[in-house]
């Protein structure tokens, strides 16, 4: 929180709403899903690595060649221990809408409502669904989603950031030269995490927020 000098009434309202949402008892009929994106640079080896052998690890040259970038969508259901991850070329509103629809279809087809936690990126809007799908098709999807937005400059309130940090440490430290390779590695990571039903335990409450942040509150 060092970069935020004052926490406005609007900031506190959104923060309190999310903390109340996270504090609810788990309800699989109305799952809370946190979502975010991450840009990933693709890197190509300039020299073939020397393979590992008994007593000697794999050896790689420090030089690499940039091979463009791609985007990774990450949605995690902290209490349910599920995540949906997809590598895309870009992160346009079409990509965003496609990812959400795919997630609902594959993981939540029987659920009547999901609570979707998002940041304030300009594609994360109800209007994006209308523009991409048309009004009638969008209405069917949007009737099942309740949007919850973090305060501006408060990504720490989105548990997708925690999941992205785990993804980075466990999967993204290796170089990937192309989107196909990255997609395969991310899919394998997702399968392992889902099989283990890895969740996120959120313990920060409104009382904690008031105790730690009160000095920054402004009317």
Image (cartoon, rainbow, N blue to C red):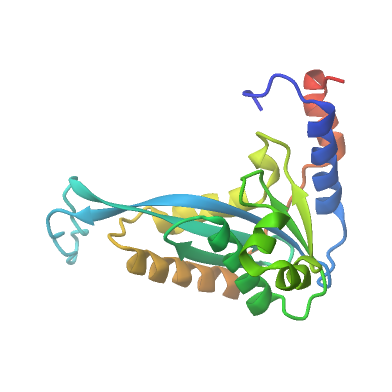
* Residue 157 versus residue 54 in the image, above or below: above
Residue 138: give x, y in percent of width and height: 72, 68
Q: In which quadrant is the N terminus drawn?
A: top right
Q: Quadrant of residue 144?
A: bottom right
Residue 203 in sight here = yes
Residue 76: give x, y in percent of width and height: 64, 61
Q: In which quadrant is the C terminus drawn?
A: top right
Residue 131: give x, y in percent of width and height: 64, 61
Query: Does residue 211 appear left or right of residue 172 in this picture?
Result: right
Residue 196 in sight here = no
* Residue 16 versus residue 99 in the image, above or below: above
Name the residue rendered at 70%, 43% in the picture: 157
Q: Nearer the viewer, residue 164 or 140?
A: 140
Residue 113: give x, y in percent of width and height: 81, 69
Query: Does residue 163 appear left or right of residue 136 in this picture?
Result: left
Name the residue rendered at 82%, 35% in the picture: 208
Q: Quadrant of residue 186?
A: bottom left
Name the residue rendered at 17%, 45% in the picture: 63
Query: Does residue 125 appear left or right of residue 171 in this picture?
Result: right
């Amino acid at each position: 929180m060092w970069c935020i000098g004052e926490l406005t009434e609007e900031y506190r309202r959104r923060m309190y709403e999310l903390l109340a949402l996270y504090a609810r008892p788990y309800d699989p009929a109305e799952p809370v899903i946190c979502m975010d994106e991450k840009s990933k640079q693709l890197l190509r080896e300039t020299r073939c690595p020397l393979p590992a052998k008994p007593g000697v690890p794999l050896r790689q040259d420090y030089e690499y060649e940039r091979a463009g970038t791609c985007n990774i969508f990450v949605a995690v259901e902290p209490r349910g221990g599920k995540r949906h991850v997809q590598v895309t070329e870009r992160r346009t509103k079409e990509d965003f809408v496609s990812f959400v629809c795919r997630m609902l279809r594959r993981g939540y087809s029987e659920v009547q409502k999901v609570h979707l936690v998002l940041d304030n990126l300009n594609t994360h809007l109800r209007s994006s669904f209308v523009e991409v799908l048309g009004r009638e098709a969008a209405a069917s999807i949007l009737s099942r989603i309740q949007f919850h937005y973090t305060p501006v400059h408060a990504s720490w309130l989105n548990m997708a950031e925690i999941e992205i940090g785990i993804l980075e440490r466990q999967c993204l430290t290796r170089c990937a030269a192309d989107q196909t390779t990255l997609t395969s590695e991310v899919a394998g990571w997702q399968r392992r995490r889902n099989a283990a039903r890895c969740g996120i335990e959120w313990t920060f409450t409104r009382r904690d927020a008031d105790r730690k942040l009160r000095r920054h509150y402004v009317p």
